[in-house]
């Protein structure tokens, strides 16, 4: 596996921590991470997120930022992965804040551009689900969300890093949730054009179709610091309590703690998966048979049969097994609204 650097080279005041064959640039403890008064921000916008409805409120949100002394430079994305390039440019230019208005995929792209830098991230909700916005209790009205951002506290948090089988994808940071198995297959099967038109309904439609087609192969998982191996058909790797849509699964996950909460599903029965849906809805999945929860800083997953097992990162396809999910501490500065 090749060396993966989040930045071309570390800036002054940055130390390097090596974990196996991955190099992580990390900020020194006690470093000045956020300007005392933010005045300069880049606003990265996916104009197609969520059908483009919420981004029409951007003018009022920018006015609110301006009233608070924050000038925003609007930068629209026009292609996949462009948000990462724009965020990396903001780092090179030493911008004081990056605000992203888009769905989970756009947020993830920006996170991968900012990871292990000193440039803070704030989120204006848009898109199909936007797990991070839900986790931060941000209102979906962009004007009210902008007001909350102007009063936000800034916290240094850990990120997750998914390192998939080398030929299937590149290492990728994630802020909210990743997974392997059934949800990876679902995310990989949803066609982007259907997602743009149907939103969250595209996942429901594909989910029910997968129940009749997917064979739920088991794969082996190994947690850091544990001799316990769990054979699962699904593992959810949570940094957030929210999973997608209205659901919460890893309800003891905490963005402010450098660890994952894992949810393993160990059954291969499609009927049991169907039976779990009402339990998820009412928040009782922890009581379900064939579902187990653990906390860890690292998880390795490997196939045990011939069927390929796919992974997802923040709701986007990210390769296939084998994969390692790893906590990268002290990796991102995040704007936390005052209610969290």
Image (cartoon, helix red, strand yellow):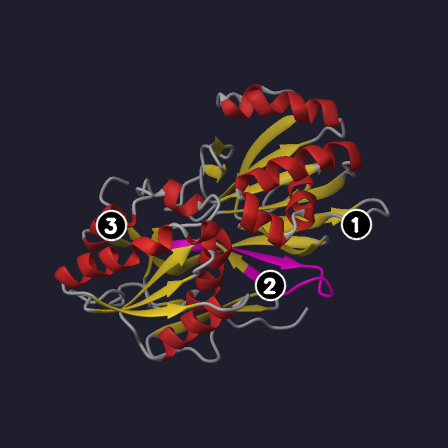
Callout 3: few (<14), some (14-19), or many (20+) C-alpha neighbours within 10 Å?
many
Any magenta on residue 158?
Answer: yes
Question: Please, is residue 340 above or below residue 24 in the view?
Answer: above
Q: Where's residue 53, x and y in %?
A: 40, 50
Q: Quadrant of residue 234?
A: top right
Mark 3 lies on residue: 143
Callout 2: few (<14), some (14-19), or many (20+) C-alpha neighbours within 10 Å?
many
- Residue 175 in sight in this render: no
Residues 248 and 294: in front is 248
Q: Earlier in the sequence, mark 1 or mark 2?
A: 2
Q: Is residue 233 left or right of residue 117?
A: right
Depth check, mark 3 against mark 2: the one in front is 3
Q: What is the magenta segment's predominant secondary structure?
A: strand
> What separation in Å lies between label 1 and label 3 (alpha carbons)?
44 Å
Q: Residue at position x 34%, y 55% from top?
A: 56
Mark 2 lies on residue: 171
Q: Residue at position x 62%, y 23% from top?
A: 276
């Amino acid at each position: 596996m090749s060396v993966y650097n989040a930045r071309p080279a570390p800036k002054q005041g940055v130390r390097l921590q090596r974990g196996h064959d991955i190099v992580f640039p990390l900020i020194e403890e006690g470093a000045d991470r956020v300007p005392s008064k933010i005045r300069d921000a880049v606003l990265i916008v996916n104009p197609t997120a969520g059908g483009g409805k919420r981004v029409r409120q951007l003018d009022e949100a920018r006015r609110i930022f301006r009233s608070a002394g924050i000038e925003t430079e609007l930068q629209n994305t026009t292609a996949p992965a462009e948000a990462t390039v724009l965020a990396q440019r903001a780092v090179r230019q030493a911008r004081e804040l990056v605000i992203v208005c888009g769905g989970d995929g756009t947020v993830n792209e920006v996170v991968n551009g900012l990871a292990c830098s000193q440039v803070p991230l704030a989120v204006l909700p848009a898109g199909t689900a936007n797990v991070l916005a839900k986790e931060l209790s941000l209102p979906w009205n962009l004007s009210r969300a902008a007001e909350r951002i102007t009063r936000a506290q800034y916290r240094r948090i850990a990120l997750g890093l998914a390192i998939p089988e080398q030929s299937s994808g590149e290492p990728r940071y994630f802020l909210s949730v990743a997974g392997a198995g059934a949800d990876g297959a679902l995310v990989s099967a949803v066609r982007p054009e259907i997602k743009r038109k149907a939103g969250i309904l595209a996942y429901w439609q594909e989910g029910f179709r997968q129940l009749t087609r997917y064979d739920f192969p088991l794969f082996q998982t190994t947690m850091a610091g544990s001799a316990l191996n769990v054979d699962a058909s699904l593992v959810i790797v949570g940094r957030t309590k929210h999973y997608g849509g209205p659901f919460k699964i890893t309800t003891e996950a905490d963005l402010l703690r450098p660890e994952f909460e894992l949810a393993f599903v160990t059954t291969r029965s499609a009927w049991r998966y169907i039976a779990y849906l009402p339990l998820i809805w009412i928040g009782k999945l922890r009581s379900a048979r064939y579902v187990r929860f653990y906390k860890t800083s690292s998880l390795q997953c490997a196939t045990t049969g011939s069927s390929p097992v796919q992974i997802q990162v923040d709701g986007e396809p990210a390769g296939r097994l084998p994969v390692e999910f790893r906590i990268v501490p002290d990796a991102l500065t995040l704007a936390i609204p005052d209610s969290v």
